[in-house]
Structures are given as C-alpha cells and as structure tokens.
Amino acid sequence: MRAKEKRLVSCALLGVFAFWTMTFVSGCGPTSSVSGVVTLEGNRLPNARVILTPIDGAGRPAQATTDESGKFSVMSIKPGDGAYRGEYKVTFSLIEDDAIDLNKLTVDTNEDARKRAAAAMEKARQADEKKAGSRNSLLHPNYTRFDKTPISIKVPTSGSVSFKLNKNGTSE
C-alpha cells in the first residue's frame, strides 16, 4: 500500500471512530429496554402515558402508554426500542380511551406530510379538549410537571421498573 492510500484509510477510520464517539456521547448510542408497571394508590393504572425527559436536556425523550394492567414498555423512536442511556425525570398523564395512542398510530404515506401532521394535531387538540382535566385530576400535579416530579430513573435499568404514585405526589 502506498503512503497516499495509507493516509486515506487512516482518515476514513478516524472519521468512523469520531462519528461513533460523538453518537455515544450525545445520547444517540444504544438503547436499553425500560419496562414495568405504574400504580396509583396501589392499584394498577391503565391508559397512562409515561414520559421520560433527559435531565440534562441532551439526548432523546422516550415514552410509553400503559396497557389495561398498568404495564408499559418505553420507546424512543419506534415501539420496543427502549430508551437511550442517561438520567431522566419521569412524568405522567392520563389518557382518555379515545385519545391518540402513539403506539397504535398508523400513517397513510400517500397523504401529504403537512396534511397528516395537521390532522393529527387537530385530533389531539379535540381529545385534549374532551378530557380537559377530568381524568388527569386523579394525578397529583407533581407527577405531571418536569420541574416538580419526584421521580427519576437512570437508564440502563436492572430489571422491571415500578412507579408507585400516590395522592400526595411523593415518590415511594
């Protein structure tokens, strides 16, 4: 191999190394499974949105919706992909039965993206108006706000996660 080819290969390898280093440092590295159960006053909580927001503002948020038995599995980009490594504050909101579940959202790829986005936003606005605090009043406000939530999590986790909510808005 000639010197010019060696330099080219070295530069390419350095570029790949730099790319992967930045990917892992910026929170876009591998994801880890985060799953568990949410309870309120000891009762499993169905149709609750679980929202993980990076504490330091870097990285990517993740979310999940609990099933009928209060179980959830977090996603960042697509169902089942988990959350990126890092520390998160965890907030919650309760969903009406007819609200949009992001895990079940289907997209018509033949429709213009702007029209799809506008339709989704309108449907979400209507669902929000309909629920207007009725079901969310069951949750203490501490659980619904990033700046107030007493719950945080470090990813990767070991084993199943249990979020035990109570009427006082404190962490157990």
Image (tube, grey):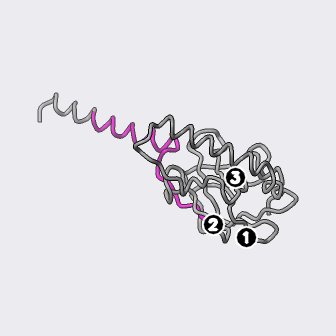
Q: Which residue is labeled 1 in the image?
A: 44
Q: Are marks 3 and 2 in contact (CB under 8 Å)?
A: no
**How far is mark 1 from mark 3, CA to CA?**
17 Å
Local secondary structure at mark 1:
strand
- Mark in front: 1 vs 3: 1
Q: Which residue is mark 3?
A: 90
Q: State the image coordinates of residue 136 (x, y, percent, origin top left).
A: 79, 54
Task: Indicate the secondary structure of the residue bearing disc 2.
Answer: loop
Few, some or many residues within 10 Å of mark 3 (<14, 14–19, 20+): many
What label sits on residue 67 in the rendered view?
2
Amino acid identity at mark 2 = Asp
Residue 77 percent location from the top left of the image: 50, 49
Earlier-in-chain disc, 1 versus 3: 1
Q: For the residues carrying marks 3 and 2, which lies nearer the camera in this image?
A: 2
Residue 11: x %, y % from top left:
28, 32
Q: CA distance from mark 3 to mark 2?
A: 18 Å
**Is 2 within the magenta?**
no
Under mark 3, the amino acid is: Val
Identity of the residue drawn at 74% across and 67% down:
39
Answer with mark 3 or mark 2, whichever residue precedes in sequence.
2
Q: Toward which corner of the image does residue 164 lie, by quadrant?
A: bottom right
Query: Which label is found at residue 131?
Result: none
The residue lying toward the viewer, choosing from 171 and 131, is: 131
- Mark 1, Cα crowd under 10 Å, few <14 / some 14-19 / many 20+, is some
